[in-house]
Image: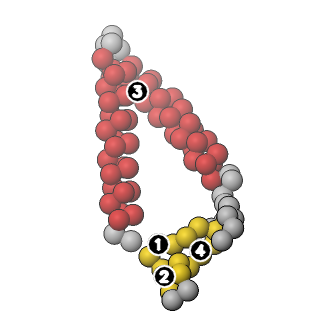
Amino acid sequence: MAYHPRLTINKHCVNSRGPIMAHQDPKPFQNLRIQTLTVAAIVIYFGAGYPLVNKIWPDSDAGLWVLILVGMVGGYLFKKRQRQKDRNL
């Protein structure tokens, strides 16, 4: 069987002639779109959050670290919920 970059073998679907080939369309711009959205979210988060933290704690060095920590915990919880949702499909 020749290798074809768009065809992959689905291990769970097997018939009497062997594994069934599944057609997968490449999504060349999906990775770029996700990276762009991530950078935009980070810019918005810090663009809106940093002035707010400076307004609440004007002379605090810990305000930026609190903002970073809240962002990391929020990202972790978002990914955890997304993985659980993907498993239940």
* 37 vs 89: above or below: above
In the rendered picture of this protein, how many numbered marks are placed on residues?
4
Mark 4 or mark 3: which comes first in sequence? 4
Mark 4 or mark 2: name the one nearer the start of the chain.
2
Q: Which mark identifies residue 11?
A: 1
Q: Nearer the viewer, mark 4 or mark 2?
A: 2
Identify which amino acid the numbered label 4 is placed on: Ala
**Type of amino acid at the residue the image marks with label 2:** Val
Q: Where 65 falls versus 41 (above or below)?
A: above
Q: In this view, does 72 lie above or below 4?
A: above
**Disc 3 to disc 2, C-alpha distance:** 57 Å
Name the disc covering residue 14, or none: 2
Name the N-terminal-most of marks 1 and 4.
Answer: 1
Q: Which mark is residue 52?
A: 3
> Which residue is outermost to the front?
1
**Alpha carbon of mark 3 to alpha carbon of mark 1: how far?**
51 Å
Q: What residue type is labelled 1?
A: Lys
Q: Is residue 44 visible?
A: no
Q: Nearer the viewer, residue 80 or 37?
A: 80
The alpha-carbon separation of the residues under discs 1 and 4 comes to 10 Å
Q: Residue 74 carries which label?
A: none
Relative depth, front residue between 8 and 50: 8
Give SS at disc 2.
strand
Residue that mark 4 sits on: 22
Whole-number angstrom distance, CA of label 4 to CA of label 3: 50 Å
Q: Are marks 1 and 2 in contact (CB under 8 Å)?
A: yes
Callout 4 crowding tier (Cα within 10 Å): few <14, some 14–19, many ≥20: few
